[in-house]
Image: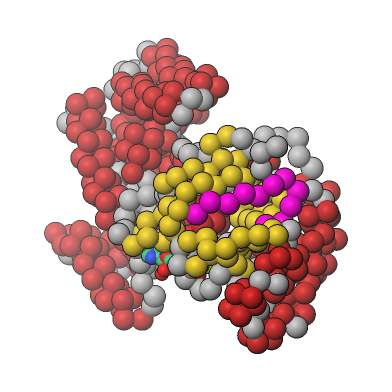
Amino acid sequence: MNALLEVDDLRVYYGKVEGLHRASLRVPEGSIVTVIGPNGAGKTTLLGAIMGLLPSAGSARYAGADLAGTKTEARVGLGLSLVPERRELFGEMSVEDNLRLGAFHRFRKRGVDLESELTAIYARFPRLEERRAQLAATLSGGERQMLALGRALMARPRLLLLDEPSLGLAPRIVRDIFRIITELKKTGVSILLVEQNARAALQVADYGYVLETGEIVLEGEAAGLASNPRVIETYLGLAGKVIAT
Amino acid sequence: MSFDIALWLVQDGVTNGAIYALLALAMLLVFAVTRVIFVPQGEFISYAALSLALLQAGRLPGVVYVLVGGGLVAAALDIALALREKAPARLPRIVALYVLVPCVMAALAWWAAPRSVGLPLQVLIVLGLVVPLGPILYRVAYQPLASASVLVLFIISMAAHYALTGLGLVFFGGEGLRSEAFSDARFKLAVLDITAQSLWVVGASFVLMFALRLFFEKTFYGKALRATAVNRIGARLVGIPAELSGSLSFLLAAFIGAVSGILISPITTIYYDTGFLIGLKGFVGAIVGGMGSYPLAVAGSIGIGLLEAFSSFWASAFKETIVFTIIIPVLLWRSLRSRHIEDEEE
Ligand SMILES: Nc1ncnc2c1ncn2[C@@H]1O[C@H](COP(=O)(O)OP(=O)(O)O)[C@@H](O)[C@H]1O
Ligand SMILES: [Mg+2]
């Protein structure tokens, strides 16, 4: 069977600078796939291209259909949802408005019950319920990440793209986030997880890719990658351990 | 200057200032959502004021040709796009919005012109003729280059302004028109002699501002529009189409422009190009308010109205000069003190 997301030879240019050099990857339905790599490897660029935020060459197919020529807004309607590295929340609006707007494309198609949906999100993120009337800009880093995740989930994605969800968060919150990621998988959402925190990412993922300077240099089952000497040396060394604990 | 005259000038200034405030709000809204400096705002004022005066004179306003023609161009662009994107399901909606609505409105105007149908219906017809021009203008002139820089969008605005002024001259002619006062009543309040028209203007402006506030705070589409203004990337990521926000903000701006034109048409004689100066004063109000704050823009616009009223009394030859020169110290002060409005993204 074909994978939910199939990316082949994807290239992205920033002017003359190549941000991504022929990346190919697969996300099978119902699985967590991770892309790990150092800062500047092209991870954010990869997700931006899949989401249609950046122009790209090569092919990206979702649920069997080519995404070329489909705008970002329409991709959201197809079931792709990105939690961006910079969160991109609506800072001057309330937490609850941020969440409601997450369901915009479904609201337009009518017949959605936003209230029960909100209840479900609040059950998963109790902190957001406490802060529902507060402006998004006043949230702490961890709460902002929760809100970005919650907003993406309001779109009912079939494929969730996560860009460094643990970036800049306290270890306790990082653990929460990764727990939620595994829970989401059980609800049938497929996840493409981009991380610098390789240890945690490889623990929750089924399959992994290593991206360096715009190229996929290594791939394999997550468990296999976690025991690969090269990955251990570069990504799971002392620095990785400190982040993961 | 006596106290009576001062009060009379205040009344005059607040009346005009209320209009400038409405226009300033439209300017801010369009800029925040689309990064467009909405220069053609003034044409919506002229078109609406002249259309109302013509309807009252029993003539068909020439704006119907602009509306139907513009609608056809917009429809052609959208149909081409839909065919290219292989989405024929969109065709009926495109035809309904850009062809059917303009034609129905034009027919209604043609029917109403020779009859005296009364002010309320005339106002509704004028709104129906002028407001759809907003989304049509966005579709034709701005949407194809929506992601261009602020400067490019500004150049488009200048072009749109000249094009619409030219069309105004062709279809309305060069004569100045004034519509009938909504009511001839006058109210004596102490020494003040308030005209009903001033009350109409100030009252309608504040009702409209309040309605806008409700729209942005309570409705889902209002929130979506605000979200686009707050974070454009975030808005795309939740699936709010940029064209929808752009179209909606132009619809609101056109509505505000048309209402302003209708409100001032009994006070001032309007020519095909008068709206530009009025719109520009709203723009000055928005700048005084920092191009970002709605309450400050309203205060700034009322200040502009007062400044204009008093300078027309003391130095009437320099009225416009004074109003537009005020921009320089304000901009200097702002550029030294506050954050810049920068050309974000790319
Ligand atoms: N807007 C941009 N303009 C120019 N170069 C960029 C831009 N964004 C990213 N890059 C470059 O593309 C490469 C990949 O960046 P990015 O995708 O952000 O990496 P990562 O997310 O893995 O840290 C880097 O070399 C970066 O400098
Ligand atoms: Mg990144």
Horizontal relation, residue B240 to residue B246: left or right: right
Residue farthest toward the left in the current orientation of the protein: B317
Horizontal relation, residue A133 to residue B160: left or right: right
- Is the C terminus of chain B in the top left, top right, bottom left or bottom right quadrant? bottom left
Q: How is the image coloured?
A: secondary structure
Q: Quadrant of residue B89?
A: top right
- Where does ligand 1 appear, by image quarter? bottom left
Residue A193 in the image: state x and y as whole percent: 65, 61
Q: Nearer the viewer, residue B234 or B211?
A: B234
Q: Quadrant of residue B78?
A: top left
Q: Nearer the viewer, residue B6 or B130?
A: B130
Above or below, A204 against A3 in this view is: below
Horizontal relation, residue B70 to residue A68: left or right: left
Q: Residue at x 56, y 40 (%)?
A: A61
Residue A84 seen in render: yes
- Is the N terminus of chain B in the top left, top right, bottom left or bottom right quadrant? bottom left
Q: Quadrant of residue B289?
A: bottom left
Residue B237 in the image: state x and y as whole percent: 57, 52
* Main secondary-structure element of the magenta-colored stretch: strand
Is residue A32 within the magenta segment? Answer: yes
The stretch in magenta equals A23-33
Above or below, B253 against B332 in this view is: above
Residue A144 seen in render: no
Q: Residue at x 38, y 77 (%)?
A: B338
Residue A110 in the image: state x and y as whole percent: 71, 35
Residue A55 in the image: state x and y as whole percent: 42, 49
